[in-house]
Structures are given as structure tokens and as C-alpha cells.
Amino acid sequence: MAITPTAPGRVRPADGSDAPRSGHVGWIVAGSLATGLVAALLLVAAPFVSPGENDVTGAVLCGFAVGWALLAILSTRYTDQPQRWAAAPALFMGLGGLLLIGFGDSLRPVLNWVWPPMLLALVVWMFLRARRQLHSRSRRWLLYPVSAVLAVASVGGGYQTVRDLLISRLAHRLELHRARVSQDQVVIHRQRPAGLLELLQPRVHLFHVLILVTVQLLQLGL
């Protein structure tokens, strides 16, 4: 039986009995992303999901994973533009959501450092794959904005993690400095005249003010 190529990696009989899949991929992209959003909202409102931050975040990620998985499956099954790359964000978000729900408190410190760079790398890869494989206006109107939101989220998550670390370290150093100053004041009070202690106090207060201002600026995100 003679065969005729129809698309890269796909052939059909010359008599046309196996027609190429020509479903509108744009509708599948829109429907899949909308389904993921609805699934995220339903999972958050589900009675078996606790209102804790880890469980809510994990439920949202699992819902989004459903949308990406649908995009990979439906585009491969019903169109001539299979978007198999969508399985990667589905796996990434689904696994991340399950880890947060099951082991959120113990894994959250590690995940806070891991997910921002991994998500940013995934977004870049998704952008390149969609640019090559998706020939539809939905790429510009839907996938590119979603990718931009994910990229901003990854950068914001990384910034938040670094800022929290800096605030924690500054607060720790401030506590250590206060304890050291208290010990020095006791020693000075015992071994030196009162005039020397009064001379040192303005400098100590100024150091405290500088550290407190720095911590406040970091908390405000300046």
C-alpha cells in the first residue's frame, strides 16, 4: 500500500482512509489552560484540602498540572500539532504540589531554594518548544503570557527566599551584638568610670538604629 507523508513522523495511506488530524489546536490550548484554572479553584475549595499554606499551594499546583497534561494529551490525540512538551510542566507542577501537600513543613525550606531556578529554566524551555511546535495565535495570546507570569513568579520566589535569609541573618547578628554589648557594659561598669560608659552609649545606639533600618527596608522590599 502506498503511503503519503503528511507531517514530520506521520504518514497516511494514499487512498486517504487515515485522514490527518486537523483539530483546531488553539481551542485545545485555551480549553486546557481554562480547565487547569478551574481544577485549581475546585481543589482549593475541596473539603479534603486543609486551609494551610502548603496544602493550598499544593492544590493549586495540582490543578494547573491537570491543565498542562490535558494540553499534551488532547493536542497529540486530536490535532496535527502535538504539544508533547506540555507534559514537562504537568509533571513539574504535579510533583511539586504532591510534595507540598504530603511533606510541606519539612521540605518547604529546601523547595524554596530549588523551585525558582528550576521553574525559570522550565519556562525558557517551554518558550522554545512552543515557538517551534505551536503554529497558532494562541501561542502569542495565551502561552506567552502564561510563560511570562511563571517567569515573574520564579524571579519573585527567588528574591523572597534571598530576602528572608538576609533578614534572618541580620536579626541574628543584631541579637548577638546586643548580647555582646550588654556583657561589655557590665564589664565597663565594673572596671571603668561611669563617664566612659556614657561615651560609648551613643555609638551603640547608632549601630542599633542602622541595623533596624536595614531590616525594615528589606521587609518592605526596598
Image (tube, helix red, strand yellow):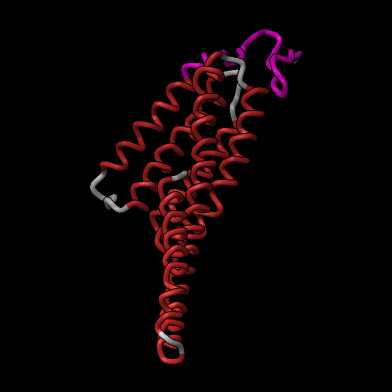
Name the residue nearer the viewer: 20 or 24. Answer: 24
Residue 171 position within the rendered picture, expressed as x and y whole percent measured from the top left:
44, 64
Furthest-top residue in this view: 15
Q: Which residue is drawn at 45% across and 91% down?
A: 191
Q: Nearer the viewer, residue 32 or 13?
A: 32
Q: What stretch is highlighted in magenta?
A: 2-27
Quadrant in which residue 106 is drawn = bottom left
Q: Which residue is drawn at 46% across and 74% down?
A: 200
Which residue is depicted at the point 66% across and 29% down?
128
- 13 vs 185: above or below: above
User: How many marks on residues?
Assistant: 0
> Can residue 106 be seen here?
no
Q: Residue 107, percent across and down?
A: 47, 61
Q: Is residue 114 magenta?
A: no
In the picture provided, is 101 more to the left or to the right than 163?
Answer: left
In depth, the one of 20 and 34 nearer the eye is: 34
The quadrant in which the N terminus is found is top right
- Residue at far bottom of view: 191
State the residue lying farthest toward the right: 2
Q: Position of residue 189 (x, y in %)?
A: 40, 87
In-image side of 81 versus 222 (left or right) = right
Instruction: Note whether 174 is above or below 184 in the view shown.
Output: above
Residue 168 visible at all: yes
Closer to the camera, 161 or 110? Answer: 161
Q: Quick check: is 6 in the magenta stretch?
A: yes
Residue pictured at 52% horizontal, 47% vertical:
159
Which quadrant holds residue 193?
A: bottom left
